[in-house]
Image (spheres, rainbow, N blue to C red):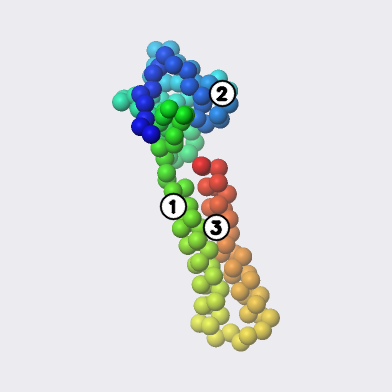
Amino acid sequence: MKPEPIDLQEQYPCPRCKRGNLHAIILTEAFGCDRCQQIFGLSEDNQTIEQLSTSYPYTKTWQWVAEGWRSKDHGLSGNYLPLVLGALAIPLFMTFWLPRYFQLPPGPGVILWITLTFLLMTLPSLMLWLVLRDSR
């Protein structure tokens, strides 16, 4: 669907909390949510709004289409699956390659080595998943 121009005189649902309504802030080209108190600035072409009061390094932007807001940001969440698969493939590769490289004899020590290496290297994958699951 094609994005529609955003009118400052209209009332829109909040794209962030999805419970509140956006109201135009007088004498500015911005909207404020009556529930989550977020402020959104309107772009010069009146096609997108962007979240202004954020602590994230990248601002979130949305476009208004007939059925509601559509996120314009794809960031890492667009590459979510390959990123997580790569983050899981590296620990698997390291757990099976390192014992052979150091020529460790098979036994309980190698199993412990593989388990510890796998757990410690999958921690970044878990952290990445926790960060990206809320960004959609």
How dense is the environment of label 1, judged by Cα within 10 Å: few (below 14), some, or many (20 and up)? few
Amino acid at dot 2: Gly
Viewer-closest of 80 and 37: 80
Q: Which mark is residue 125?
A: 3
Nearest to N terminus: mark 2 or mark 1 = 2
Taking 115 as reference, is 64 left or right?
left
Q: Quadrant of residue 119?
A: bottom right
Q: Residue furthest left?
A: 45
Q: Is residue 32 visible?
A: no
CA distance for labels 2 and 3 = 34 Å
Q: Which circle, 3 or 1, is nearer the viewer?
A: 1
How dense is the environment of label 3, judged by Cα within 10 Å: few (below 14), some, or many (20 and up)? some
Q: Which circle, 2 or 3, is nearer the viewer?
A: 2
Q: Quadrant of residue 17?
A: top right
Element type at mark 2: loop
Q: Residue at x 55, y 76 (%)?
A: 96
Image height of 114 relative to 29, above or below: below
Nearest to N terminus: mark 3 or mark 1 = 1
Q: Badge 2 is on which residue?
A: 20
Amino acid at dot 3: Ser
Q: Residue at x 47, y 29 (%)?
A: 68
Q: Are marks 3 and 1 in contact (CB under 8 Å)?
A: no
Q: Quadrant of the N terminus?
A: top left
Q: Badge 1 is on which residue?
A: 79
Q: Residue at x 52, y 31 (%)?
A: 16
Amino acid at dot 1: Asn
CA distance for labels 2 and 1 = 30 Å
